[in-house]
Amino acid sequence: MTGMCYPSSMRPPGVQSALAAFLLAAAALAAAEPGFAPLFNGKNLDGWRLVGGVGPGYVVRDGAIVCPPDGGGNLFTEKEYANFVLRLEFKLSPAGNNGVGLRAPYQGDAAYQGMEIQVLDDPDPEYKDIRPAQHCGSVYDVFPAKQGALKPTGEWNQYEITANGRRVTIVLNGQTVVDADLDTVKDPQALRRHPGLARATGHIGLLGHKSHVEFRNIQIKELP
C-alpha cells in the first residue's frame, strides 16, 4: 500500500516540520556558489567542534547557526584552512556581540592566538566607548574597519573575508572595510599580544559571548 499524499495545507504537523527542515538544508547546500563549498549544511553542526562552550553553546534553528543569549563559546570548523575566501551572513540582536575566527588553534583566545573579525552591533549605546579596532568588521584589536556598512539589528549582513598569505580583506555588505597587510604590524607589544598574526593556517570559528547572534550561508573557497 502506498503512503498517503496530503495537500500542503492538510499535511500533519510532523510532516510539515520535516519537510521544512529538508528544504532549509537543501537551500543551504544549493546556496554555495561555483568554486565554493558549504561549511554548514543547514540542519546540524556536523564538521564543527565546540570548545569552551557556555550554556547550550550553539543551536541550529531555521537553517541558521544560532548563538542563544545564554550560549556561546568557540564553535570551530574541524578542518584547518590557510588561504581562502569565506562568505557568510550574520544577523545581530540589539547589543549583539560575536566574532569570526581565522587561522585559529583550538587552544587559547582565538582573537590573539589566531585572528578575530568583529561581529558587533556597535551603534548600540553599550559600545559608545569602544576603540576603533573593536568596531564591526575590524580585525579585532589590530586593524580598524571603516564604518557605515553595517545594517540595523534584525537584518542579515553579508561578509566576504579573504585571507591570502599576509593580506586580509574584509567586505561588509559590498563595502571594503579592511584591506590590510599583516606585515605592516611592527609594534613589538602588538606582535607579542597577537602571536596569531604569524599563523599561516588554522580553524575558522564563531566566537560567542552570551549574546544572540545568527549565522547562515557559510561557504568557503580555498586558495592556492
Image: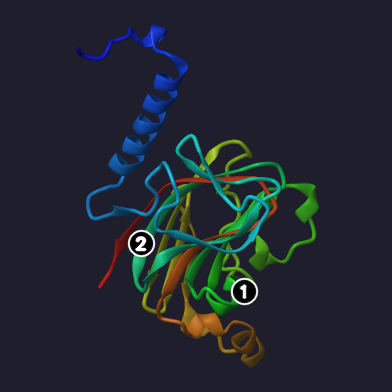
Residue found at x 57% / y 50%: 58
* Earlier-in-chain disc, 2 versus 1: 2
**Tag 2 secondary structure:** strand
Mark 1: which amino acid? Answer: Asp
Residue holding disc 2: 85
Against 47, is 9 above or below?
above
On screen, residue 10 versus residue 94, left or right, reads: left
Q: Toward which corner of the image does residue 80 lie, by quadrant?
A: bottom left
Against 104, is 186 above or below?
below
* Pointer 2 local density, CA inside 10 Å: few below 14, some 14–19, many at least 20: some
Q: Is residue 108 visible?
A: yes
Q: Nearer the viewer, residue 208 or 167?
A: 208
Between marks 2 and 1 in the image, the one whose residue lies nearer the viewer: 1
Residue at the bottom extreme, as displayed: 188
Q: Nearer the viewer, residue 53 or 104?
A: 53
**Tag 1 secondary structure:** loop
Mark 2: which amino acid? Answer: Val
Q: Nearer the viewer, residue 198 or 148?
A: 198
Q: Check residue 109 in the rendering and tell me which mark sits there, or answer none.
A: 1
Q: Toward which corner of the image does residue 7 lie, by quadrant?
A: top left
Q: Check residue 50 in the rendering and tell me which mark sits there, or answer none.
A: none
Give the image location of residue 117, x and y in percent.
55, 63
Give the image location of residue 23, x and y in percent.
35, 30
On screen, residue 156 versus residue 10, left or right, reads: right
Against 221, is 32 above or below?
above
Q: CA distance from mark 2 to mark 1?
A: 23 Å
Residue at the front extreme, as displayed: 1
Q: Nearer the viewer, residue 110 or 175?
A: 110
On screen, residue 134 versus residue 184, left or right, reads: right
Residue found at x 66% / y 41%: 93
